Amino acid sequence: MYDVDFNNPKARGLKYEELESLLDGIPARQKLLLLDACNSGENDKTEVLKQELQQKEKSMDSSQVLAARGVIIKLEEENKSNFKKMNELFVNVRNNTGSVIISAAGGQESALEAIKVDGKTIENGAFTYSILECLKQNEGKELKVNTLKQYAEKRVEEITNGKQKPTSRQETMEVDWGVR
């Protein structure tokens, strides 16, 4: 969704139901969806709020700081509940359609592009670069989806110096099949 309005993602963003419908409509039982996009993983706004509070604490009195921390704790509890629901939805997608979904970045992260790896500016974003690198390294060999997932998670974090961390919204260890 190249033209999404992050202030109003409902306007031009992709709804989960549309993604689910797309995957449901594909008859294959082994599907891999790679989301190479900014903000494509888990979205935890409490981290942003913690950073903002830390910056503003000096100008607030202690009761305001305590109140803000209380709001953050409440939001964290809600996020845990929402994350559990999201995991259940993604597990349902995986169980019903045979899908594995890997996203390039966390909910508050950019999918980095035009970075240098080994002194050269890469042509793709860090996530796509890592996926292609793994495929090339395993050419002619059997490559399992979990190996690809683990490689991308480690390599992207490595080449972006921890600025980008791919995620899969469910654990896929029990669903491990060969990538062709």
Image: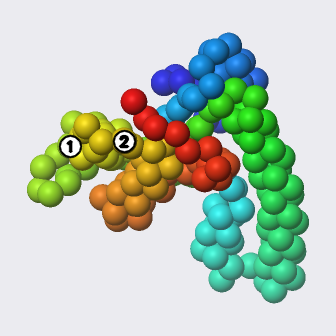
Which residue is at 81% across, 53% downward?
84
User: x, y percentage for residue 145?
Assistant: 48, 43
- The CA span between labels 1 and 2 is 26 Å
Instruction: Pick the residue in front: 32 or 159.
Output: 32
Identify whether 62 is placed above or below 177: below
User: x, y percentage for residue 69?
Assistant: 80, 75
Please give the residue where the numbered disc 2 appears in the rendered image. Answer: 142
Which residue is at 67% across, 70% downward?
50
**Res 70 seen here:** yes
Q: Which mark is residue 81?
A: none
Q: Residue furthest bottom?
A: 62
Which residue is at 86% across, 55% downward?
81
**Res 10 seen here:** no
Mark 2, Cα crowd under 10 Å, few <14 / some 14-19 / many 20+, is: few
User: x, y percentage for residue 14?
Assistant: 65, 24
Q: Residue furthest left?
A: 119
- Total labels: the figure holds 2
Q: Which mark is residue 122?
A: 1
